[in-house]
Amino acid sequence: MTERTVLAGKNKMTSTSLLSDQRGVVALEMPAVVFFLMITLLLPLADLGIAGFQFISAWEALRSFGQYVQYHSPPDVTNTSSWTSTLPTTVAGYPINNLQVVCGDTNAVCSSTNNITSPRSFSYTTTVTIAPMVLTTVLCTSSNANKCSFTLPYSERFQ
């Protein structure tokens, strides 16, 4: 017997039943595994990523507004009602709310009673609204589960 006939005998395909041949099982399980991973891993990560980008852009809008106020300050900084005509109400699509001037070292809001100390900084807020796809119970604490709103405070010194 030659070496060639011995090798041919070992490579001979034996008859097997369809159930014992499991080469195609992975191809049948793969859609279920991919669907499971998409729902449990990738969609929540997408929710966190989208929320993170929205928070970062809102924070940058607050910083941009602070820089704008530093370079374009109104003549009377203690009278915030005169600021409405000179300052923008929205920055990069985010509304600027609760604009207040803070006086002294105690961080008290400037008013007619505590204008003795010089104004040190101003504070304001904006609102971020997110609409998570999967993580609504984790990210949203409000009653409206489709959209959540968060208020970001910010303050900037004058000089």
Image: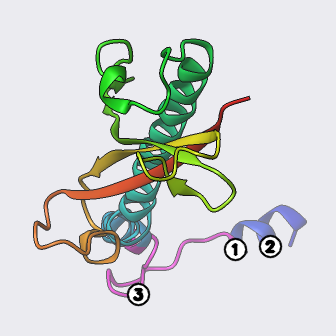
Q: How far is disc 1 from disc 3 in space, using C-alphas?
A: 22 Å
Disc 3 target residue: 20
Disc 1 target residue: 9
Pick the quarter of the image with the N terminus: bottom right
Q: Position of residue 130 (x, y in %)?
A: 28, 51
Q: Position of residue 109 (x, y in %)?
A: 47, 52
Dot 2 lies on which element?
helix
Is residue 142 shown in magenta?
A: no
Dot 3 lies on which element?
loop
Pick the quarter of the image with the C terminus: top right
As drawn, 138 above or below 68: below
Which region is colored magenta?
11-25
Which of disc 3 and disc 2 is earlier in sequence?
Answer: 2
Residue kind at label 1, given as amino acid type? Gly
Which of disc 3 and disc 1 is earlier in sequence?
Answer: 1
Q: Quadrant of residue 43?
A: bottom left
Query: Which circle, 2 or 3, is nearer the viewer?
Result: 3
Left or right for 156, reference 10: left
Q: Look at the image and name its color scheme.
A: rainbow
Query: Which circle, 1 or 3, is nearer the viewer?
Result: 3
Q: How far is disc 1 from disc 2 in space, using C-alphas?
A: 5 Å
Is residue 19 shown in magenta?
A: yes
Residue kind at label 3, given as amino acid type? Ser
Which disc is residue 6 wearing? 2
Badge 2 vs badge 3, beta-carbon distance below 8 Å:
no
Residue kind at label 2, given as amino acid type? Val
